[in-house]
Image: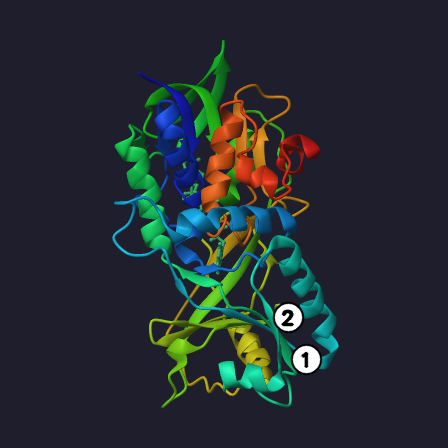
Amino acid sequence: MSVVDFVIIGSGIAGASAAAALAPRGHVAILERESAHGYHTTGRSAALFSPLYGPAPFRALSVASRAFLSAPPDGFAPHPILTPRGVLNIATEAQRPIIESLAAAAQRLGVAHRLLDQAACLAACPALRADHVVAALEEPEAMDIDVEGLHQGYLRAARQTGADIRLDAEVTSLVREANAWRVTLKTGETLMARVVINAAGAWGDVVAGLAGVAPLGLTPLKRTAFIIEAPEGVDAGAWPSVIDADEAFYFKPEAGRLLVSPADEVPSPPHDAWPEDLAIAECVERMQAAADIPVRRILRSWAGLRTFAPDRHPVIGYDRAAPGFFWLVGQGGYGVQSSDASGRTAAALALGEDLPQDVRALGLSAGEIAPARF
Ligand SMILES: Cc1cc2nc3c(=O)[nH]c(=O)nc-3n(C[C@H](O)[C@H](O)[C@H](O)COP(=O)(O)OP(=O)(O)OC[C@H]3O[C@@H](n4cnc5c(N)ncnc54)[C@H](O)[C@@H]3O)c2cc1C
């Protein structure tokens, strides 16, 4: 039987980034139920790095992740993780206060930003309609993320420092014995671990249930995305990502085409999520009110579960009642862009240390992300 310091349940971006940070400090095993890493939410993201996107703790974790994502160590990934994109948070007259408050948040966080007038909006994305968009908050340093490269980089780094990474390894039972957890897989195999790290995404509360730990009330919210052709004769590849100030939709260039999302949030049980035609049709209508983008056909569509804690903040820390049970869940719609700092934070707290200094300097405290707050 294997005996390890940390068993991480789930090899999505949360589990992978924590494993990369923990593996140099202890013996780590990552257990993933599926036959491929990133099969669930991590493999279904829109791949955007926009630190202004999301509640304050995610903004801090994303800002703190920027240095690593911009310049990962040699050999981490074959290609740059971040490439320039930019974001326009577009507003109608009624939505102006939203972009003004985003500008204030950007100022506080030291995130580069500019308020654009209508002419500048149309120059940045000529498809926008002058009868709809009056202004935008531009985040010029927002980036596209190579999610696959980043995810594989974390897993490679963890493996190179001794982590044992297993696919087809669904955890079906967690029993506390003396000072360790007996972790049993569907295959019947058993491991002993000092600490269990629950990075099971939408299944976070289900995994807690296996251990007899009280659920946090995590809510998986389904989000849809789809691909369409870019308008004919237009070089849409240079457009920024365009996000409606109320998040009624967003679109961004994606390999010569456009990725579009209704930015929907449909409460769902944990499952292999699929897209709904109605959500796509309604999104096309909302997008076309703001931008002149013909939609002849949907080339591909998918959906994924963005999982939120009740206060929509991340949950990183030991359970208050179950010794050795550590939560790393509630990454919502920001788990990729915040992954470096979130993984380092999880590693520090799992080792009984304080938050990383750069994360603390951005105003985040362990209490704000601790499961004990519920
Ligand atoms: C449409 C969409 C767009 C998004 N866009 C962005 C974006 O632009 N930028 C951004 O930063 N984020 C974005 N996100 C959010 C981001 O994808 C998530 O925050 C992140 O992927 C969550 O990672 P995770 O590791 O927590 O979950 P997951 O990737 O779902 O990983 C959890 C893993 O746990 C495994 N598991 C569960 N139970 C068990 C068990 N019993 N035993 C073993 N394994 C188990 C599952 O199989 C799964 O692989 C988007 C999400 C969606 C759906």
- Front one among 99 and 202: 99
Q: Is residue 361 above or below residue 94?
A: above
**Tag 1–tag 2 contact (CB < 8 Å):** yes
Q: Secondary structure at mark 2?
A: loop
- Is residue 357 visible to us here? yes
Q: Amino acid at mark 1?
A: Thr
- Report the residue that reaches farthest toward the top: 178
Query: Mark 1 Cα within 10 Å, few/some/many (few <14, many 20+)?
Result: many
The answer to which of marks 1 and 2 sits earlier in the sequence is 1
Place residue 213 in its image quadrant: top right
Place residue 208 in its image quadrant: top right
Tell me what residue is drawn at x 64 percent, y 70 percent: 245
Disc assigned to residue 132: none
The answer to whether 10 appears left or right of 130 in the picture is left
Indicate the position of residue 78 as horizontal and vertical percent values: 25, 52
Indicate the position of residue 325 as horizontal and vertical percent values: 53, 25
Tell me what residue is drawn at x 47 percent, y 26 percent: 196
Q: CA distance from mark 1 to mark 2?
A: 8 Å
- Is residue 199 visible to us here? no
Disc assigned to residue 245: 2
Query: Mark 2 Cα within 10 Å, few/some/many (few <14, many 20+)?
Result: many
Q: Which residue is mark 1?
A: 92
Indicate the position of residue 11 as horizontal and vertical percent values: 39, 40
> What number of labels is visible?
2
Q: Amino acid at mark 2?
A: Ala
- The quarter in which the N terminus is drawn is top left
- Front one among 215 and 238: 238
Indicate the position of residue 294 as horizontal and vertical percent values: 46, 87
